[in-house]
Image (cartoon, rainbow, N blue to C red):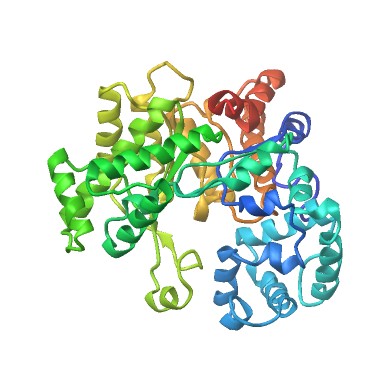
Amino acid sequence: MKKFLDEHFLLETDTAKLLYHDYAKHLPIIDYHCHLPPDEIANNVNYENITRVWLNGDHYKWRAMRANGVNEAYITGAKTDAEKFTQWAATVPYTLRNPLYHWTHLELQRYFNIHDILSPDTATQVYNTCTDLLQTQEYSTRGLISKMNVEVICTTDDPLDNLAYHQQLKSEGLALKVLPAFRPDKAMAAENTEALNAYIDKLEAVADATIGTYNDYLTELKGRHDYFAANGCSVSDHGLEQIYAADYEDSEISFIFNKIRNKETLSATDVLKFKSAMLFEFALWDHEKGWVQQYHIGALRNNNTRAFSNLGPDTGWDSIGDFSQAAALSKFLNRLDTEDRLAKTIIYNLNPADNEVIAAMTGNFNDGSVAGKVQFGSAWWFLDQKDGMTRQLNALSNMGLLSRMVGMLTDSRSFLSFPRHEYFRRLLCNLFGNDIENGELPNDTPWVGKIIQDISYNNAVNYFKF
């Protein structure tokens, strides 16, 4: 019987162990998509306690605690940080076979060298040990990043952000690169015209301009895109239910924009056409600048109306959606490709039933200009766990070139999430190791080891060119 979470965790064969320990383990990390707050990196924050860095904002843990019968007061409510941690520690023993059980103990080991199982019996000791360490310089935000050998972090930033913290970090001349990513979801969210109008008003203030027409809107948003580029940005990101690719005329979008500004009600068709037009314009700007564009598709958000009303978005009420993806994605990518203005593109899929759909679709638009130009991105959100990652890797292997994949990302708000890269690399090495020992791949360790290193690190270096 293997020991829980030992050095060969997830590695089932001798070949897998060799591939991981000799080729993957010590590679740096390029985290090209996450939600880390740049102000906390710039200010090199030390967290007051383990709850602040580990539980605050982590809706994965919040969902598990709710499922375990924990009152909301101990999750997002007014209870003390110590009380909240105690409730999380009481929940952990019930997360067996949930990926949180692995994440929790992997993070305790890698950051704090704690090998105890978290439970009510160990909660106080773990809380005090971690909290004491978090007061030291080695455990500041930058210290935590350094511990994981991270070279590049791309945050997720609204177009209206002034990027002051990114500018501060750049001015310090750090070896670590912290770069912005252009996330314009709010700028195209026509389903809520009141919020979109408020957003346009804010853009007017930021740009010091009057936005009276759709063309004005595009001009000022393009100015923000240019501003991001001037501040080191070379990636965009979109969080969508599905790709929007309705047919439209420019005159129609101008008319719809006027309806938005006049606070008139939009039809479902109006909303779809406006989103389609905006998404296409963003893609043109990305191609013009040679950026990488990323699309996270498939989330059905804010399902619990009562909870959403009380707590707002990103608090644990989202799930996997079953949207139809293929036709619109094909139409969108094909329009850009037909005009020879398709940027390097990564599609992240949330519904595992669509894995083969996405893997096959991306292959339609690789044109030989760049290795892996259109990518089936790593498993994300509900799927960034053992089964989900393995299924994504297998789908990509069967439909495309896994060897050209740009690897893993954290997609996280936590500074303790970087071991997800290790988790991914272990699973990757296990797949290749099993195939070699089953006689399904040749026992060519140097070549397979190179492929492992490419997927884990080198491909991202060459693809993003940070």
Indicate the position of residue 249 as horizontal and vertical percent values: 14, 39
Q: Is residue 212 above or below residue 407?
A: below
Q: Hey, which residue is sitting farthest top in the picture? A: 368
Which residue is at the front of the view, 248 or 251?
A: 251
Q: Is residue 37 above or below residue 409?
A: below
For the point 35% across and 42% down, the residue is 220
For the point 61% across and 26% down, the residue is 461
Indicate the position of residue 232 as horizontal and vertical percent values: 56, 33
For the point 75% across and 66% down, the residue is 50
Indicate left or right for 38 with 119 as reference: left
Q: Quadrant of the C terminus?
A: top right
Which residue is at the front of the view, 438 or 161?
A: 161
Q: Quadrant of residue 243?
A: top left
Q: Quadrant of residue 136?
A: bottom right
Q: In this rendering, does residue 309 appear at all? A: yes
Indicate left or right for 430 with 195 as reference: right
Indicate left or right for 182 with 86 as reference: left
Indicate the position of residue 148 as horizontal and vertical percent values: 75, 43
